[in-house]
Image (cartoon, rainbow, N blue to C red):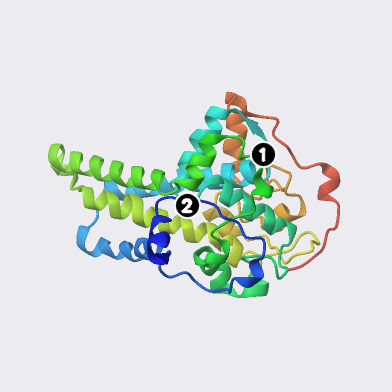
Amino acid sequence: MKIWATLAKWIANENKFDPDLKKYPDRIDWLRSVPFILLNLSCLLVLWVGVSYVAVGVALALYFIRIFSIGAFYHRYFSHKTYQTNRFWQFVFACIAGSCVQRGPLWWAAHHRQHHMCADEPEDAHSPVQHGFWWSHMGWFMSKKYYNYNPERVRDLARFPELVFLDRFDAFIPALLFISLWAVGSFLHNFFPDLGTTGGQMIVWGFCISTIALFHTTVSINSLSHVFGKKRFKTKDNSRNNLFLALMTLGEGWHNNHHHYPAAARQGFMWWEIDITYYILKLFEKMGIIWDVRNVPKSVLEKNLVEEG
C-alpha cells in the first residue's frame, strides 16, 4: 500500500506537513524521485533524436522564459512580495514557473521563506555550509523530509484556489507542455520537413534539456552562491554575490545583496550588477502588469558593508 501511495503522489501531491522534521532522516526517497531521475537521464536521448535549429531555439527560449518566471514570480513575488500584480497575471506566471518541474508556488515559497528564517543554520534544508554540496543542490529536493511544507508560511497564497490546484497537481502543467511540444514537433515534421524537426527533438531539447538546465541553474543558487563569490554586506549567513550565476539566472546570483535586503525587487544593487529579471519587471511596471515595485533604500546600501574578495 505504501508503494501505491507513493506512486499516487507523482500525480496528486497533497501536503501533509509534520512539524517534527527530526524524525525524518536526511535520505532520498528513491521511489518518489523516479520521475525526476528519469527526466535527468532523458537528456541522453539527444544521441538518438538528433538536433535541429528549431529544437535548440525552442529550448533556449523556454529556458529564458521559464527561468525568468522562477526568479520574478516564484521568488521575488510569491516568496517575498516585492511588487504587486493582479490575480490573472499571478496565475499566468505561476503556470509558466510551474512548468519548470520545481513543484508548485506554495511549496516553493514556503521553503524559501523558511530558508530566509534560518539561512545556513542546521534547520536550513539546502545549506551547503550545513549539509554539503550534493544535499544542498538536489538531495533535499528528493527527500521525503521536504516534500511537504509548513502551510503557516504561505497562508497569504493559500487564499487562491487556482494556486492551491497548481500546487497539488504540480505535474499537470509540465505534462501539458510535454504534450504540446510533441504536437508542435510532429506538425513541423509532417508539414515542414525541410526544417528537420521532429516531435522527439522538441521533447528532448524543448522539454528535457531545457528543464534540466534551468533546474540545475536554479538550485545552484543554493549549493554554490553560499560558498563561491564576493560578500559585500555582512549577513548572518554565508551568502555570496556570484557574477556567473547572476548571468545564468537573469539576476538571482547577486545573492549576498538579496540576503542583505530581500524586500527589494532588484537584486543587482549596483548599476554594473546585471539583473535582467529586474529590467523586465520594470518594463512590466510600465505596461501596468505589475505595480508598487519595491526598491532598495539608500540607507540599505550603506549598512553593514564589508570588504571581501
Residue 32 in picture, x, y percent from top left: 42, 64
Q: Nearer the viewer, mark 2 or mark 1?
A: 2
Q: Which residue is mark 1?
A: 156
Quadrant of the drawing holding the C terminus: bottom right
Q: Which residue is mark 2?
A: 13
Position of residue 7 in the picture relative to residue 252 (left or right): left
Residue 27 in picture, x, y percent from top left: 53, 74
Name the residue located 58 percent from the left edge and 74 percent from the top edge. 25
Residue 134 in picture, x, y percent from top left: 53, 73
Outermost residue toward the top? 288
First of labels 2, 1 by sequence position: 2
- The quarter holding residue 123 reads bottom right
Label 2: state its secondary structure.
loop
Outermost residue toward the front? 1
Query: Please, is residue 216 above or below residue 188 in the view?
Result: below
Residue 278 in picture, x, y percent from top left: 62, 41
- The reply to whether residue 273 is visible in this rendering is yes
- The reply to whether residue 228 is visible in this rendering is no
Quadrant of the drawing holding the N terminus: bottom left
